[in-house]
């Protein structure tokens, strides 16, 4: 996948001229021209220029100029390059006409559904746009610059990332942005919502607004199309899908759910669903994995703004993991008591903050690692409390002399936070010429050199991790705290699924729940060491939404209840 960073010029609309018979800017020009023409005619005819005659000519020019301005005035909104003011989106806006025509193909119910889903999508955007970590990721992903070479303001980058996703969604449906197409009503509503939230588009005036706003949005959509065509994302991947995947998987899935509902409602606007629209709606809800884009793997703490809940409270809210919660609480209390003893002038025991998380995939190791980073920050052990997640590929290079550089770079990004190395045992599972040992040596040295600024958590399967630690005395002396993550029970897997249902504004009937319960019981009974646990549940949930999308795609009129309900036929067999 290309990692080309494209440069784009900022574009901004200017207001179009007035369309009534008042003078305005264009009317003044016509007034001056017509007045001079009338004076020239008087001179040509030999009339004596008196004050009264000049006043008469001026008044005549006023009315004639206004009349000509109304006929020949400029009706098109122009786009001008404004590299230093790119965060402003202006457009021509005037009150709706009473006799505006409405396309009879779009029913009031369909309009209401499209408007509701547009508002839901915009409300979700208004939440994520405030997240510092999301803004930082967006700033990294989109390298957009003004004509003078300066970076775009981050707020503008966020807007265009969002607009580009919606625009791409409509292109996938086969829609073109023109005034005659009701299918792009959702795009028009969304752009208006971003440009001017105070503008109210209703079923009675939407046809007029689409017509008069069309040209004003063309410049915005042209930039959006450039971003889409830059080749940074594959055809069925979206910018915020990637960003939120790095930030929080739950936010990512919720975004894709809103996007699907928005696209589904828009596809029904013309009263029919084409084969292309059906296929595209199915693709939107496919796997939200983002392996197709080349970007840094370091991950900042996705909960850095959720200050209303403490890390320990967040840990207790997790489903299952009872033994893990006890171990973390025991460690936390031990650290607190040692800090109090130190304050009282008493001797303290040496505390090892480094940990080893053992267990099968999908048991919450990464999630708990982020929480532990927050706990350490709260206790004053580290300053930032962020988590940098990596694995063998992020530490080991292919050529001599590069592994130490690569490992040091990752460690530098984790200073004052926690470095989380998944499947750490893979560092010693290469050939004799493998550079994994060099990565381990570099890591051990930096742990000693930066012992007050770096905490490391290693994770992997229980047996493999034990062999890995025993293979190196340096690892044995630094890692002596093991926390084991047990597999989830069938009931806990069902609870996780139900939590996703609630979090993403779905409902599920009793038959579907019974089918899920039976499915999870069979899976747990026949699982092996590679069982995905919560990761498996997430895949089932995503597949369920895909099945629901296929079931609903044939319906021409969808209600909010249709879009929300999960039935037994949607559950994977």
Image: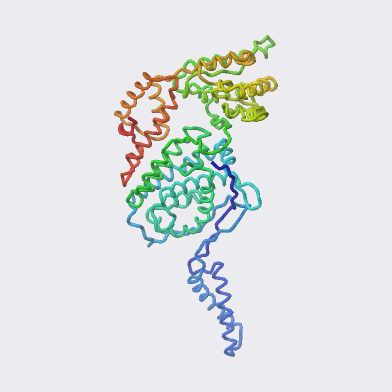
Which quarter of the rendering shows the C terminus?
top left
**Can residue 453 be seen here?**
yes
Farthest bottom residue? 46
Given residues 525 and 21, the one toward you in this image is 525
- What x and y, as percent, mark residue 4? 58, 44
Left or right: 36 with respect to 68? right
Q: Quadrant of the N terminus?
A: top right
Q: Quadrant of residue 437?
A: top right
Question: Is residue 317 at all visible to an observer of this figure?
Answer: no
Image location (x, y in percent) of residue 9? 59, 53
State the residue lying farthest toward the left: 511
Q: Residue furthest front?
A: 432
Q: Looking at the image, what colour scheme do you see?
A: rainbow
Residue displayed at 52% across by 56% down: 91
Name the image quarter holding residue 545: top left
User: Going by the image, does 52 lie left or right of 199?
Assistant: right
200 versus 131 height, above or below: below
Q: Position of residue 459 (x, y in %)?
A: 54, 21
User: Is 162 on the left-hand or right-hand side of 151?
Assistant: left
Pick whichever, 171 or 218, lies toward us. Answer: 171
Of residue 319 and residue 9, the one placed in the foreground of this image is 9
Q: How many marks?
A: 0
Q: Is residue 122 left or right of residue 337?
A: left
x%, y% of residue 385? 60, 26
Q: Is residue 438 above or below residue 228?
A: above
Vertical order, 19 against 345 (above or below)? below
């Amino acid at each position: 996948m290309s990692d080309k960073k494209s440069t784009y010029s900022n574009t901004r609309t200017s207001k179009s001229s007035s369309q009534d018979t008042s003078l305005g800017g264009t009317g003044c020009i016509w007034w001056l021209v017509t007045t001079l023409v009338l004076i020239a005619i008087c001179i040509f005819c030999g009339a004596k220029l008196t004050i009264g005659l000049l006043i008469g000519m001026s008044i005549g020019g006023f009315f004639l100029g206004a009349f000509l301005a109304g006929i020949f005035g400029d009706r098109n909104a122009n786009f001008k390059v404004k590299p230093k003011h790119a965060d402003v989106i202006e457009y021509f806006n005037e009150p709706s006409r009473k006799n505006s025509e409405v396309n009879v193909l779009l029913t009031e119910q369909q309009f209401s559904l499209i408007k509701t889903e547009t508002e839901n999508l915009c409300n979700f955007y208004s939440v994520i746009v405030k997240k510092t970590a999301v803004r930082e990721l967006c700033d990294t992903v989109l390298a957009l610059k003004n004509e003078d070479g300066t970076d775009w303001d981050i707020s503008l980058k966020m807007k265009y990332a969002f607009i580009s996703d919606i625009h791409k969604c409509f292109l996938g449906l086969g829609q073109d942005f023109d005034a005659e197409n009701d299918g792009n009503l959702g795009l028009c509503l969304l752009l208006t919502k971003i440009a001017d939230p105070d503008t109210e588009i209703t079923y009675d005036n939407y046809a007029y607004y689409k017509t008069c706003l069309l040209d004003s949005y063309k410049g915005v959509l042209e930039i959006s199309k450039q971003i889409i065509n830059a080749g940074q994302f594959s055809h069925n991947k979206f910018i915020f899908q990637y960003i939120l995947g790095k930030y929080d998987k739950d936010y990512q899935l919720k975004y894709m759910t809103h996007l699907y509902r928005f696209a589904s409602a828009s596809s029904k606007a013309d009263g029919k669903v084409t084969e292309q629209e059906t296929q595209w709606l199915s693709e939107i809800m496919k796997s939200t994995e983002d392996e197709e884009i080349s970007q840094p793997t370091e991950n900042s703490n996705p909960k850095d703004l959720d200050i209303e809940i403490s890390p320990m409270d967040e840990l207790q809210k997790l489903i299952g993991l009872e033994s893990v919660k006890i171990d973390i609480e025991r460690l936390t209390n031990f650290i607190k008591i040692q800090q109090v003893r130190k304050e009282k002038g008493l001797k303290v025991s040496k505390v090892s903050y480094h940990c080893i998380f053992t267990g099968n995939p999908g048991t919450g190791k990464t999630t708990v690692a982020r929480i532990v980073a927050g706990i350490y920050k709260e206790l004053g052990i580290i300053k930032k409390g962020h988590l940098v997640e990596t694995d063998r590929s992020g530490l080991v290079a292919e050529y001599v002399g590069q592994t130490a550089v690569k490992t040091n770079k990752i460690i530098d990004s984790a200073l004052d936070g926690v470095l989380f190395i998944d499947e750490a045992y893979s560092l010693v599972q290469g050939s004799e010429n493998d550079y994994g040992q060099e990565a381990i040596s570099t890591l051990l040295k930096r742990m000693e050199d930066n012992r007050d600024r770096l905490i490391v958590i290693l994770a992997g399967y229980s047996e493999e991790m034990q062999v890995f630690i025993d293979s190196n005395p340096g690892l044995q002396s630094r890692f002596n705290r093991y926390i084991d993550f047990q597999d989830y029970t069938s009931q806990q897997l069902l609870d996780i699924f139900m939590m996703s249902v609630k979090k993403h504004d779905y409902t599920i009937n009793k038959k579907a729940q019974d089918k899920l319960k039976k499915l999870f019981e069979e899976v747990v009974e026949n699982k092996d060491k590679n069982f995905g646990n919560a990761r498996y549940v997430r895949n089932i949930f995503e597949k369920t939404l895909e099945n629901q999308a296929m079931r609903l795609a044939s319906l021409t009129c969808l209600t909010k209840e249709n879009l929300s309900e999960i039935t037994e036929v949607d559950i994977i067999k």
